[in-house]
Amino acid sequence: MRIVFLSLFLVFILFYSGVSLGVGGGNITFKPQKARKVVFSHDVHVQNSRLTCVRCHLDLYRMTKGMDKPATMAEMNQGKSCGACHDGNDAFTVKENWSRCHR
């Protein structure tokens, strides 16, 4: 019983240490045709905001490169893609703060 408890404890520690270190991702640069580029920082979202990978990568985005098409601002304003969290409640809204992302 003690070995089972210690094993579960170690798995728990390893999992959460990986999440807190901001495992994986890096920066992703989007280059819209009619707007300035957007650099998505996994570090800002995972380390600073303490989000886990599954917060976005289960419902919003797939983890396979090239599987998701870029979202339009209209779609984000409807709560899709970045707009799922950037709605003015969870994080700054995409409607009035486009310059925080487009640089």
Image (cartoon, rainbow, N blue to C red):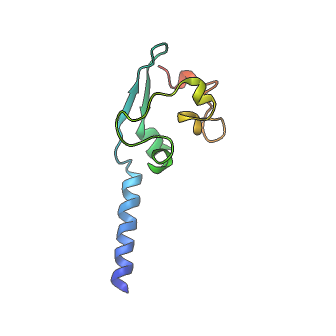
Residue 38's x, y, as percent?
A: 45, 24
Residue 49's x, y, as percent?
A: 51, 44
- Give above or below for 45 relative to 40: below
Q: Nearer the viewer, residue 35 or 61?
A: 61
Q: In the image, is 63 to the left or to the right of 70?
A: left
- Give above or below for 77 relative to 7: above
The residue sitting at the right extreme is 89
- Give above or below for 85 relative to 1: above
The residue sitting at the top extreme is 34
Q: Quadrant of residue 46?
A: top left
Residue at x-position 37% and y-position 86%:
1
Residue at x-position 46% and y-position 27%:
70
Tally the numbered discs: 0
Q: Quadrant of residue 83?
A: top right
Q: In the image, is 33 to the left or to the right of 82?
A: left
Q: Nearer the viewer, residue 69 or 49?
A: 69
Residue 12's x, y, as percent?
A: 40, 66
Residue at x-position 36% and y-position 80%:
4
Residue at x-position 58% and y-position 28%:
75
Q: Nearer the viewer, residue 35 or 6?
A: 35
